[in-house]
Image (cartoon, helix red, strand yellow):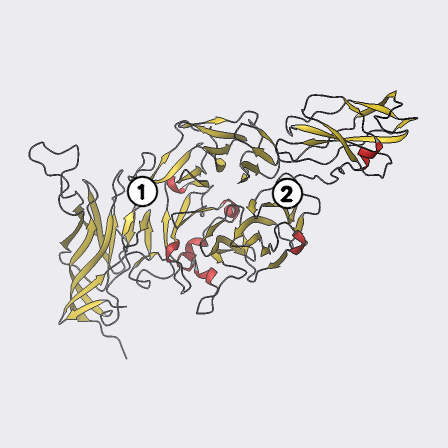
Amino acid sequence: MFRGFMASTKTVLYIDHLDEGLDVSGGPNEISEYGSPDCLNVTFDQFGSVQARNGCTSLNSSAIGTFAIDGMQSFNSSHVVWANGTMYTTVATSFAAVSGTTGTFTTGANMASVVYQGVLFFSEGSTGPWRYETDQTFAKIGIALPAAPTAVSGVATVSGGGPEGGSYYYGVSFVNSHVVEGQIGTSSTVLTIAATATVNLSSIQTAPASTPAAQRFLYRKSTTTGTFRYIGSLANNTATTFTDTVGATTWAVGAAAITDGTGPTFFTTVVEHKDRLFFDDANDKTIVRYTEHRNPYISKAADFINTNKGDGANIVGVAVQDDLVTVGKQKSIWVIKIATPGDDTTWSWAKTPGNVGFVGPKCFVNVPNGIFFLGQRFGKISGFHLLSGLNLTETQDSRLRSDMMSNRIRTDVLSFSSSLWSSAALTLFNNVVYAAVAKSGDTSNAHLYWLDTSRINMEGDVGSWSLWDGVAAKQNCWVVHNGILYGGSSQADGKVRQIETSGYSDDGSAINAYFWTKLLGGEKDIENWIKDFRFVNIWYYRLGSYSMKVNFRIDADTSDGNYFMIDLTPPGALYGVGVYGSSVYGTGSSYAEIMKSFGALLGRRIQLKFSNNNTLAQGFKVNAFKLLMNLRREIKTAA
């Protein structure tokens, strides 16, 4: 659409903002004048400006070996990292291995984790699942089953003080440090006593270090099919003997033993919702399992939901949106409504429409309107989607809004490497989605798509996309720790990096930041005219003592064309370089306007490129520009 004015043959075209982002949905002369057919390493602000992105800085001065980062979590004051089969926590600017974890986990496998009740729970799908606490306690989540104790009768008593004559069986259960009791272990062999007597129990198993116990409960029953009832406890994990002096009256009202204390199974995706953990089952990827209410250490055998078993698709991600647990399979998405959190018989679940599935366990992130994710349909990449409530919401033009979320970059999406879809890693920080992906030719996540979600609305606006490359784009996982966004490297460099630090440097490397405009001059009323492009007025920001490069080319030119430089030095002297007694500091505005001549430049359309000249520690920021041109002659077309 022509935006500007024409007086005689003098024409002005005013582009008052540059924030619609990357758009490869059409040719460079077909997209919006506010978008870009080719931009890299830029961001957009609320005032419509385009600018070079900030850089990133390594958190750890020493690499965690020559391996990629497999997972990260913010836990209390610690920044927890998994790499090379080991768990690490921050110590100043380096990471130290957590005692007992070296070589425990599967190197290269995504670590799924969640923090609940002040405990970190995690698994990579083939070990654990594990828990970690601030006292450096590293152990499995579940509670072990004890072996059978040995029972022998003691001295018969006349005045009571023990089991009456008869046959008895004994069992033991472990109780963890959170006072959660596990399932009763193996029953002892039968012990028959002739008269009332005390019974001595020995060989009482102590809990292994992998599933530590703070205490143990003792039980007995009188028949093989009877109920084990509580007779006492050992308030430690060291003693191996116990004397049963419980008479019949007390024993009859003792608490029954737990008969199903199954712990959570291995998982590759996990989330907490309404005081339960929800996760996949590595042994059966068609069911979603959950823990008992307010008890993350027990997941009974029947604590699962069948998401259409036998449909040929596995669960790859579990998330939460609003009041719903969302289960992403390869071919579909299911939602679970938790009516009463403490009563799983009141829950309901359903499959959402659209036949769209998740691509991997890190491919989604919660946004204010729902869940934003990278999806697949019929075995092919389908783009970035927005799931809100039970539906993939439609736009006013009746097309799935989810398909519209990445319509502007659809060509790019189709180039994502199919063998690495599952490695896609998304996060949300300051209303921006960061989506690390692998494109064709990549061997790991090496590109990142930046999306401003504050622009997403029900009128169909899908936000502003930008493509990043360089070190900041090479991320395998994300975490926000102490209000700062960190990325775990997808490269074999063992690095954790803070994203979008001040300055224009990726760990000391230059950032190649640029923004090509649309081919301008083909707007209605003047599209068939040859123009004499004379001048450009640019509104920009003076960021530092360096220059911004502005390239310009016409029509079908695919080279970088010609260029001019704009000095970005602030109006006052830079601190540290001024001359005492003569320099002026901090005067004037950093916002400036300049007019530049193109010289003799004839053509139908013109395209501009703003860049930092791919130079270390340099950026650029442009708010708007105005083209001044003369119309020379109209190209006539046959009727």
Residue type indicated by callout 1: Asn
Q: Earlier in the sequence, mark 1 or mark 2?
A: 1
Q: Classify mark 1: helix, strand or loop.
A: loop
Q: Nearer the viewer, residue 290 or 514?
A: 290
Q: Residue at x 26, y 75 (%)?
A: 637
Query: Is residue 160 found left or right of 263 in the rendered image?
Result: right
- From the viewer's perspective, tell me whether residue 558 is left or right of residue 155: left
Q: Is residue 332 visible?
A: no
For the N terminus, the image quarter is bottom left
Q: CA distance from mark 1 to mark 2?
A: 40 Å
Q: Is residue 305 above or below residue 152?
A: below
The residue drawn where x is 78% and y is 35% is 229
Residue furthest front in the image:
159
Report whether 180 appears left or right of 410.
right
Q: Which residue is mark 1?
A: 54
**Image x and y of residue 586, in percent:** 15, 41
Q: Residue at x 39, y 40 (%)?
A: 483
The amino acid type found where label 2 is placed reads Ala
Quadrant, the C terminus: bottom left
Residue at numbered disc 2:
282
Residue 388 shown left or right of residue 153 in the figure: left
Evaluate whether residue 450 shows in this view: yes
Number of numbered markers: 2
